Image (cartoon, grey):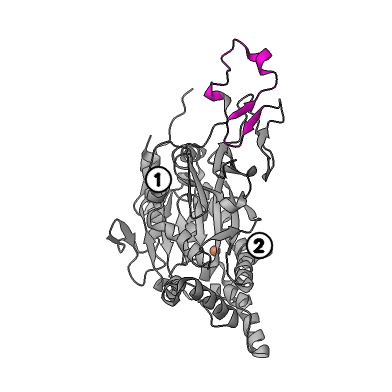
């Protein structure tokens, strides 16, 4: 029976969206088909698969995929599926498959570019059948397109569409900013991530990423507690470690200050939140790092790099990047009310160790299971999902500062002093409606 397609056009208006976009399983299926299984989705960093045969598995939309380093050094992205009976070729999240994949069910083998290597007893078993070596169905299916920008690997399951750089547009600054901060011009992955299951729709998470209105509310008690300890330590020792400031900023940066930041909203749903939590102190570690950076790039370029004014970049629909702190969150929707996020962080190649320690501290302070920051957000996400499922109303409001957005050069920026605008949410839903409208 043909299923009725949901009417997504009526669900999105310029300043509000219907709750069904967060709760309707039919809309979720359509999102997987028309967004996640078409556009460029972040797979991972090339340093996750250093040697030929190294692989990492991930989900693109509803598809289990393998990112694998090929024999020629290229990074391939394959469907995690043996063409024989459909068995997943690898069951582990990551590892090395050596020179080839070997299906654990009937020992069919495949090269790391997906091409069939061998079927046991092929001559005797398949003579006269359609199953010949020349039949492309004998190979493991590959993602239609794979591209790499500064070490960050993306795949698209659609053969047509913009190139990765065309798709990312100005939002690719997320990767430039992160890599340029490394004296060697590149980063490498720290090979473990936090994996967090959120009991909420994937869009609720993305909307939160550039929501400058929420930190002073959601994270107020956590920030205040950190600030009290910070002041206490400073009183006793004259100086509290920067990590306390990273937490206390959630409470000490006021809503007025957040309003001084700006959001930049680009086509395809990408958004940037400018501003920065004052993480360029003049301590010895920072000054050492600045010297190394100046040696690598020259003084002027070093200044340019360190004054890049970004807090957060959202690369729609599956990635949010905090480049000055070398971390990113990849979004893997699992169901209409269940979302996996993988939170990774990176080392700046060539930077002194204390700079890595600082990024690691931030990474743990906001994401680890023992921090309150992530827990604060997760509780709100779950409460959003629960509330939206109820009959208390039909619409979600994105009216804040609506009508004040400034359109220029194909993008929309928030008016000065309106950093807490809901423009990023409006921009995401505008892109969502455009993607969903394309059959
Ligand atoms: Fe938050």
- Above/below status of 252 relative to 91: below
Q: Is residue 114 magenta?
A: yes
Give me the residue at 51% from left, 37% from top. 143
- Residue at figure coordinates x 67%, y 89% from the top left: 237
For the residues bearing labels 1 and 2, Cβ distance under 8 angstroms: no
Of pointers 1 and 2, the one earlier in the residue sequence = 1
Q: In the structure shown, which secondary structural element does the residue marked by tag 2 occupy?
A: loop
Q: Is residue 434 visible to us here?
A: yes
Ligand 1's quadrant is bottom right
From the top left corner, tell me how far across and down residue 395 is, in percent. Answer: 42, 50
Residue at 50% x, 47% y: name it.
154
CB at mark 1 closer than 8 A to ligand 1? Answer: no
Question: Label 2 belongs to which residue?
Answer: 368
Range drawn in magenta? 108-137
> Left or right of 74: which side holds 21?
left
Q: Does the magenta stretch include residue 59?
A: no
Q: What element carries label 1?
A: loop
* Number of numbered discs overlaid on the protein picture: 2
Number of other residues with Cα within 10 Å of mark 1, as a class: few under 14, some 14 to 19, many 20 or more: some
Q: Which of 376 and 285 is in front in this view?
A: 285
Where is residue 66? Give x, y as percent.
Answer: 60, 40
In the foreground, 197 or 133: 133
Residue that label 1 marks: 163
């Amino acid at each position: 029976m043909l299923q009725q397609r949901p009417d997504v056009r009526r669900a999105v208006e310029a300043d509000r969206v219907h709750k069904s976009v967060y709760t309707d399983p039919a809309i979720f299926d359509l999102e997987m088909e028309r967004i996640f299984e078409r556009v460029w989705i972040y797979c991972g960093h090339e340093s996750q698969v250093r040697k030929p045969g190294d692989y990492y598995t991930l989900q693109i939309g509803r598809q289990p995929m393998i990112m694998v380093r090929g024999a020629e050094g290229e990074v391939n992205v394959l469907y995690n599926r043996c063409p024989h009976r459909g068995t997943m070729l690898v069951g582990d999240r990551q590892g090395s498959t050596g020179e080839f994949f070997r299906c654990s069910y009937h020992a069919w083998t495949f090269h790391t570019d997906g091409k069939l290597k061998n079927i046991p007893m092929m001559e005797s078993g398949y003579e006269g059948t359609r199953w010949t070596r020349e039949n492309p169905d004998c190979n493991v299916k590959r993602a239609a397109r794979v591209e790499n920008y500064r070490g960050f690997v993306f795949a698209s399951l659609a053969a047509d569409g913009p190139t990765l750089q065309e798709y990312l547009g100005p939002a690719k600054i997320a990767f430039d900013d992160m890599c340029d901060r490394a004296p060697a011009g590149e980063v490498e992955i720290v090979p473990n991530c936090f994996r967090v299951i959120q009991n909420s729709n994937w869009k609720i998470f993305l909307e939160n990423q550039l929501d400058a209105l929420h930190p002073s509310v959601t994270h107020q008690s956590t920030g205040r507690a950190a600030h009290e300890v910070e002041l206490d330590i400073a009183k006793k020792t004259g100086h509290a470690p920067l990590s306390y400031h990273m937490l206390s900023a959630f409470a000490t940066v006021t809503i007025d200050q957040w309003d001084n930041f700006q959001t930049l909203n680009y086509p395809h749903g990408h958004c940037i939140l400018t501003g920065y939590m004052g993480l360029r102190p003049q301590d010895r570690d920072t000054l050492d790092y600045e010297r190394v950076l100046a040696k690598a790039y020259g003084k002027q370029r070093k200044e340019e790099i360190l004054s890049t004014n970004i807090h957060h970049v959202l690369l729609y629909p599956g990635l949010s990047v905090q480049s000055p702190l070398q971390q990113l969150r990849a979004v893997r929707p699992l169901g209409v009310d269940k979302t996996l996020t993988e939170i990774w962080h990176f080392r700046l190649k060539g930077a002194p160790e204390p700079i890595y320690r600082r990024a690691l501290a931030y990474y743990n302070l906001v994401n680890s299971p023992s921090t309150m920051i992530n827990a604060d957000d997760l509780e709100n996400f779950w409460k959003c999902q629960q509330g939206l499922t109820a009959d208390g109303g039909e619409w979600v409001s994105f009216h804040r500062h609506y009508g004040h957005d400034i359109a220029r050069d194909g993008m929309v920026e928030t008016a000065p002093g309106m950093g807490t605008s809901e423009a990023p949410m409006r921009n995401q839903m505008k892109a969502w409606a455009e993607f969903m409208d394309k059959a």
